[in-house]
Image: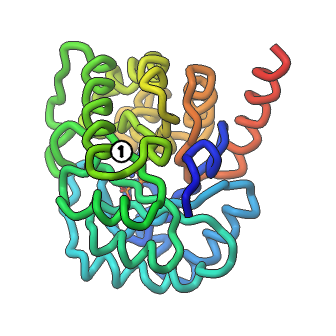
Amino acid sequence: MAVSVEELLPRPSVMGVVNVTPDSFSDGGRQLDSGDAVARVQEMAREGAAIVDLGGESTRPGSDGVSAHEELRRLLPVLEGVAGSGVLLSIDTSKAEVARRALELGAVMVNDVTALRADADLAGVVAETGVCLCLMHMLGEPRTMQEDPRYDDVVSEVAAFLEERLAFAVRAGVPEERICLDPGIGFGKTTQHNLELIAGLGTIASLGRPVLVGCSRKRFLARITGDAESLVGSVAAGVAVAVLAYERGASIFRVHDVREHVEALAAAHAFEAAA
Ligand code: HH2
């Protein structure tokens, strides 16, 4: 496989999220059964997802990591169940061993929330296999990242980080056209930081690579809608923010509610084409 991110996922593309974890913030536990997870992947494809991101380790605020063995135990039955069906899969992992196995089973993208900082072997696996790669910004680590995150200027600091990680990945042998960049909404950011990043997405898009955003169901959406407690944001608020992100240059939308985002982004796309 040797295609660019733009060819694989033209703007706008929806990336469905299927977590096979007992503790994901947004869909915790509901998809632990691998048969259900395979069915959900297929359903997302029917609803218009261009690709489905499969995760076996939660990265929600406060979460601890799991071993590669446990991640693979969760993921393998789902990867095997989807293989050969024609649905494009991305693998949400920071571990080379997990990525290698998922890519052998047909995944076409590695989504690394650590932007190649966690496992020194991951860049080599991506470079060798010729798949696409998402590099995401995160301040700190999931266990502690929401404890008082601070920036002088969140947009320029996140953009500078992504520019540096892009250069690192290219030096490690991953062609630039196979890389997309993600500001990491909710990863070491307050509600205000998240909003400033969405408003400033043009700065990140100007780095020249497609921008992926994941706002779906995140808790800052609950804060915006006046819910001070909920860990899960509303679908309507997520769709609104996705459309605003599209307008500011985002290309790929990582979401749990595929149909709603596909329809809203089709409307936004038609509007942009006519304007
Ligand atoms: N968000 C989450 C996980 N992976 N990857 C990228 N590239 N961008 C994101 O914004 C992103 C991500 C967290 O959301 P979710 O998968 O629903 O929860 P959990 O990590 O608890 O499984």
Q: Nearer the viewer, residue 37 or 217?
A: 37
Residue 70 vertical placement versus 231 (above, below)? below
How many dots with numbers? 1
Q: Position of residue 177 (x, y in %)?
A: 49, 42
Q: Which quadrant of the rendered structure holds the N terminus?
A: bottom right
Q: Position of residue 25 (x, y in %)?
A: 38, 55
Please, what is the three-letter code of the amino acid marked with disc 1?
Answer: Leu
- Residue drawn 74% across and 58% down? 47
Quarter of the figure with residue 156? top left
Residue 138 vertical placement versus 80 (above, below)? above
Q: Secondary structure at mark 1?
A: strand
Question: Of all residues shown, which one is farthest toward the right?
Answer: 274
Q: Position of residue 36 (x, y in %)?
A: 58, 79
Q: Relative to residue 61, is residue 217 drawn left or right?
A: right
Q: Relative to residue 254, is residue 166 drawn left or right?
A: left
Q: Nearer the viewer, residue 270 or 177?
A: 177
- Residue drawn 25% across and 30% down? 161
The residue that disc 1 covers is: 135
- Residue drawn 55% across and 30% down? 250
- Residue drawn 38% across and 27% down? 194
- Colour basis: rainbow
Quarter of the figure with residue 29? bottom left
Residue 7 vertical placement versus 33 (above, below)? above
Q: Nearer the viewer, residue 213 or 11?
A: 11
For label 1, the crowd category at 10 Å Cα-Cα, with few meaning under 14, some 14 to 19 and many 20 or more, is many
Q: Which quadrant of the rendered structure holds the C terminus?
A: top right
